[in-house]
């Protein structure tokens, strides 16, 4: 049972990094989309 709990905690930690910076990734993608739209209309 401890193994299952440890594996779940490890998965949550990995997702935590992406979730922590999710707003940053979204902002970068929006900026890239706007930049590409202006560069290649």
Image (spheres, grey):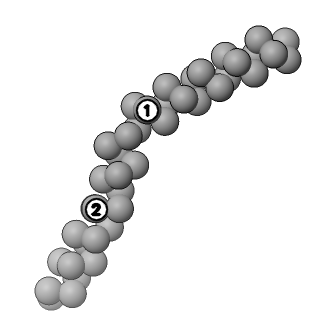
Residue at point 81% right, 16% down? 39
Q: Nearer the viewer, residue 22 or 2?
A: 22
Q: Name the residue carrying label 1.
A: 24
Report the label total.
2
Q: Residue furthest left?
A: 2
Taking 33 as reference, is 18 above or below it? below
Taking 4 as reference, is 37 above or below it? above
Q: Is residue 35 left or right of residue 17?
A: right
Q: Distance from label 1 to label 2 (Cα)?
A: 18 Å
Dot label at residue 8: none
Q: Is residue 6 left or right of residue 29?
A: left
Q: Quadrant of residue 33?
A: top right
Neighbour tally class for label 1: few under 14, some 14-19, many 20 plus, Cα within 10 Å: few
**Residue 23 pos. (x, y %):** 40, 31
Q: Quadrant of residue 6?
A: bottom left
**Residue 15 pos. (x, y %):** 35, 56
Tell me the SS state at disc 2: helix
Dot label at residue 13: 2
Taking 23 as reference, is 6 above or below it? below
Q: Earlier in the sequence, mark 1 or mark 2?
A: 2
């Amino acid at each position: 049972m401890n193994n299952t709990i440890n594996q779940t905690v490890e998965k949550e930690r990995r997702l935590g990094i992406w979730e922590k910076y999710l707003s940053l990734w979204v902002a970068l993608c929006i900026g890239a989309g706007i930049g590409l739209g202006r560069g290649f209309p």
